[in-house]
Image (cartoon, helix red, strand yellow):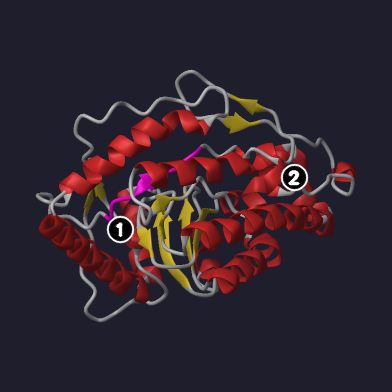
Amino acid sequence: MKGRDRVNIEKEISERKNRWNALLSGAENAENIITVNYIGDVIPKIYVTDGHYEQLSDWAVQKYYQLMDNMSWLQDDTVPFLDMLTGTEIFAEAFGCEVVYPQNNNPFALHKIESISEIAQMKTPNIWDTRLANLFDMAYKLRERTDKNAIFRVPDIQSPLDIAALVMKKEEFFMGMIDEPEAILELTQKTHAVLTQFLDEWFKAFGREFIAHYPDYYMEYGVTMSEDEIGCVNTDVFSNLFLKELNDLSNRYGRIGIHCCANSRHQWQSMKKIKNLCLLNLCQPTEVIKEAYGVFKDTCCPAAGIRSCH
């Protein structure tokens, strides 16, 4: 890449970041955001079948260079990134959960503990003693192959409660939230510890700016995660178990973006209490999305409205 071209691309990337920052901060001059996920002839992404995400490195490198090439002609708001997206299993696996590797889909974890009585005995792992450490190795190598300052799309980040719901037998987990919430809090404190250790180390190693795991939007700082179990609980459970956890994470990292696939309309007023909620992505029918715009218009970016053109 010629020096002048590089300068122009870096200028364009900076302008795109500024547009994202304006949108997420609620600035009056914020513009609509459009991302077009064009990756040309990049080799197809394979499904990981053995837990070694390093096998996706060639695909991630090709995708990064395609996104950089797009900068010269595709007038959207995509910020080029190295794609480190994983399955939902990575944090549950760190707690000893068995992982299933389908041939035609993403990996997923099977529960490790069967009952409330097992929570106290469950150890909190150090991430460096788990395969989470391999993701750091992969990230360093990807930067060596591309750009020392390249931004990463972070691995699949589940909330501490969503991770706990993977670690524990689901029906026992839900009953525990009602009958023994203190025990569930003990479990989520352990998943919270692993998640925050991972995020702290990740941001220390690779910087605070990143691309969210879903949808793939730019964040100058903060944290993003999936929060799907809220669709299965009432507002009291949300207030007692979910809200403090989300506020703690938002305070720790400065702000928070949330992706939710669940039917969570009954939680919307409670979700407005999440501190520094800058973006909310709801995967719901169009009429529900339109309703959400009105509810959250003064709370956060109406990010149910981030649309990716494929």
Displayed quadrant of residue 218: bottom left
Q: Secondary structure at mark 2?
A: helix
What residue would you read off at disc 1? 305
Of residues 281 and 144, which is closer to you in this image? 144
x and y, in percent, of residue 185 in the image? 77, 58
Q: Secondary structure at mark 1?
A: helix
Residue 173: numbered disc: 2
x and y, in percent, of residue 159 in the image? 60, 54
x and y, in percent, of residue 162 in the image? 62, 48
* Residue farthest to the front, as pictured: 3
Span colored in magenta: 79-86
Displayed quadrant of residue 133: top right
- Amino acid at the residue labelled 2: Phe
- Amino acid at the residue labelled 1: Gly
x and y, in percent, of residue 42 in the image? 25, 31
Residue 244 in sight here: yes
Q: Is residue 170 above or below residue 22?
A: above
Badge 1 local density, few (<14 within 10 Å), some, or many (20+)? many
